[in-house]
Every structure is written in structure tokens, then in C-alpha cells.
Image: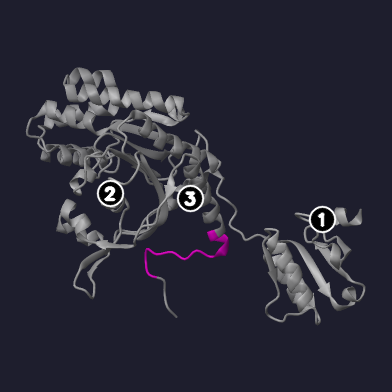
Amino acid sequence: MYDRIKGFRDFYPGEMAARREAIDTLEDTARSYGFREIGTPALERAELWTDKSGDDIVEELYAFEDQGGRHVALTPELTPTVARMVVAKQQALSKPIKWFSTRPFWRYEQVQQGRQREFYQTNVDIFGSSEPEADAEILAWAADALTGLGLSGEHFEFRISHRDILGGVLEAYADDVDTEAAIRAVDKSDKIETGEYHGLLVDAGLSPGDAEEFADLIATGDLEAVEATADTERVTEAVENLEAVLAAAEDYGAREYCTISLETARGLDYYTGVVFECFDSAGEVSRSIFGGGRYDELLESFGGQPTPAVGVAPGHATLSLLCQRAGVWPEESVATDYYVLSVGDTRSVAAEIARELRDDGHVVEADVAGRSFGAQLGYADSINAETTVIVGERDLENDEITVKDMASGDEVQVPVDAFPGDHARPTIVEFQD
């Protein structure tokens, strides 16, 4: 008996049916905004991450040397990959570039609620626009995707901030502060004790008094107070940009889900502007559902032309937790339109009926195991067949078949040449008429 590897999941048909319905909602919403689907490799050169984050990040990756002697890794996130793809064909691609994809990723990290070592995300990105409308469209897509799943403002909120507000305020306290380290501390602030949080800010270059004052200031989310404390062009422009994004989000129908939260920082260093995270409004999911933001400098760091970019990546595990707690997760069960039950030497007729039903777009199963009448009927019930078409030797002698409604148990005999006919979904009532 072989055990499943820790941090990896199996999805049986019922679970996969629910996941497929949710994924279809995310992707169909992306298509409605004009995002185009892309496919990306599971394996990349490890340097794609070590060059930016240092060799220590290898401990968090599924990294190894392949048979060609290359240091490679299973992709832990999509952003560097899509950045590489844009750079490769940057001159030929029409701007803005609007891409989406759904796929698995891998990180060797502690397994916990909503986090596995193999996990799935739907990534949605816009390249080539620095306008607030691009940020707002990402927020609007996220809001429409969540409401399309049956969620509402009672279930989720977007906590939105701006990296330059945090960086500008930090610089106002000390010229030599390590802003990236301090922002990473802010990103951890809701997961650690206050004393540890302040200690990380001190380690980043703030005095103990300034660390406490800074933490209190950004906790208020008061943009006027922030501008008064750090009266710099950088902070003023960041506040104006954040307000412009929120104004566009109002027009795009997403503002009602947005709350200014300057403690929302996003830990990855490549974020440059507006950032946001989606949280469970009820607080029942212990971590953010997903996050996103602007990363205007990443493509240039990959050797491309300066190209603004903004994106978001809902993780399916945390999203399913949110939907389950809200009672809107799709039913985890299989569904079948028709089961074609064959009794005796009737395979050719049964097969022809099954083909015609499939040609009409229905989900159809038929016996492939040589089972008895009762066993086939039991199987039809187990796969939630709505209708069973019984093709028996005696009925065929009269050029008829039996159509059984599985919910009511009602049956009717129908001429073979009248079924399925021109009916998209034949019903017993139609044939009785």
C-alpha cells in the first residue's frame, strides 16, 4: 500500500466536479473582461528565484539538478514565469497584455489550513498600463469572480494599501531604514506578538519610539494623518494614486468591497504600488484568501523594457474554505443526464441511442461491465442519472424503449425512432402527449 505524499492532495470525482465549477466561474469571468488564457511550464531554471531572493530560498522550493546538469525547480509561483514570457516577445505583443491561467504550483513549506505543498491558483495579470483603471479592473474581476461563486460583501473584503505610502513614511523616520525589511515586518504584524513586531521594525533601522509610533500610525489607516507625518512627494503621490484606484473601483463596481488597510503590505519585494489582500469578513479563515498588486519594475529586472504590471492570484484552497463557510461551495457530487441500460442482445441499438444523446450535448453513460438489470439500475442511481433509457429485447420487439425518470420513478414506453428525436431533453410528459 502506497501512501500519498504529505502536502499533496487527491481529488475524487465529486470533489473535482465542485472544483471544476469554481474554476470555470473564475476563468469565465476573466474571459468576460478580455483576459486571454496562457499555458506555462511546471519546471523553470531555479535562478529565476535565487537571483532575486538568494540561495536560501532553495529550501522552500522543490529544486534539483536535472540530467543535463541544470539547476531547476518546480514553479512556486507564476509571476516570474509570465514576466519571462512577456520579455521574450515584448515588442510583438499588443498592449495592454491581459493574461490568465489556472495551474498547480509547488513549495516545500509547512502544511496548514488552506496551504498545501502542491496548490492551485488562477492568475490574472495586466501588463503595459500604469493607469489606475488597470488596478481597478483587477479588483473588479476579483469581486465579480467571488460574487459569481455566490459570495457577497458579507463574506469577504479587500484590504488595500500602497507600498510607497509605507516606504515613504519609513523614510521620514530614518534615512538609513531598511524599507524592504520593515515592510516584511508589517506584512507579518497580524501573525506575531506586538513586541516581536516592534522588534523587527527596530532591526530594520527604526528607534524603539519610532517603531511604536509608526506601527500606531499605519494601524489607523488615516491617509491625512499619514501625509501630515510624512510630508513628502513620494507619500503624496502614493496617496493620490491609491485614491485614484479606489475612485476607479467605484465606477467598476468593486469599491464597496475595499477597505483602506495600510498594514496590508504583501511580503514579496517585487511589489511597487497598490497592493491588496482578500480576507474572510467573518474571520473564520485564519489567513488571507488571496492577494495581489502592482509590480512595475519586475519585467525590467528580467531584462525587458520598463513595463508596468498588476495582477492577482486567488488560491483555490483558501477560496474553497471561504465558500464552504459561506455555504456556497458547489455540491461535491457527480451528475449524469442519461444512463442507457441495455438488457439482452441490444448493444447496437443502445450504443446508437447513447451516441445521439451525446451528439445533443448530454452527459451519457452506458453499461461496459456486462451487469444485470438491477445492477445497472443501481449504478445509474449512484451516478445521479436524471433519466435512464432502458433498451430491452422485449420492448424492441415492439420497436419501443422505456424511459424512466429517476427522481419520480415514472416510466413511459417510447417508439425507438422517436427518441431522442428533435428534443433537447426528452421528458415523459412530452412522450405521453
Residue farthest toward the left in the current orientation of the protein: 176
Image quadrant in which the N terminus is located: bottom left
Q: Position of residue 45 (x, y in %)?
A: 23, 62
First-in-chain label (2 vs 3): 2
SS for dot 3: helix
Of circles 1 and 2, the one toward us is 2
Say which residue label 2 marks: 83
Say which residue label 3 marks: 320
SS for dot 2: helix
Snapshot colouring: one colour
Judged by its main secondary structure, the magenta piece is loop
Q: Position of residue 295 (x, y in %)?
A: 26, 40
First-in-chain label (1 vs 3): 3
Of circles 2 and 3, the one toward us is 2
| The one of 91 and 97 positioned closer to us in this rendering | 91
Q: Position of residue 298 (x, y in %)?
A: 23, 44
Q: Is residue 242 above or below residue 111?
A: above
Is 284 within the magenta?
no
Say if residue 282 shows up in the picture. Answer: no
- Residue at point 45%, 38% (across, down): 141
Left or right position of 140 against 309? right
What's the magenta region?
Answer: 5-16
SS for dot 1: loop
In the rendered structure, which amino acid carries the disc numbered 1? Thr
Residue farthest toward the front in the current orientation of the protein: 92
Distance from the alpha carbon under mark 1 to that under mark 3:
35 Å
| The one of 332 and 412 positioned closer to us in this rendering | 412
Say which residue label 1 marks: 427
Say if residue 250 shows up in the picture. Answer: yes
Q: Is residue 243 above or below residue 345?
A: above
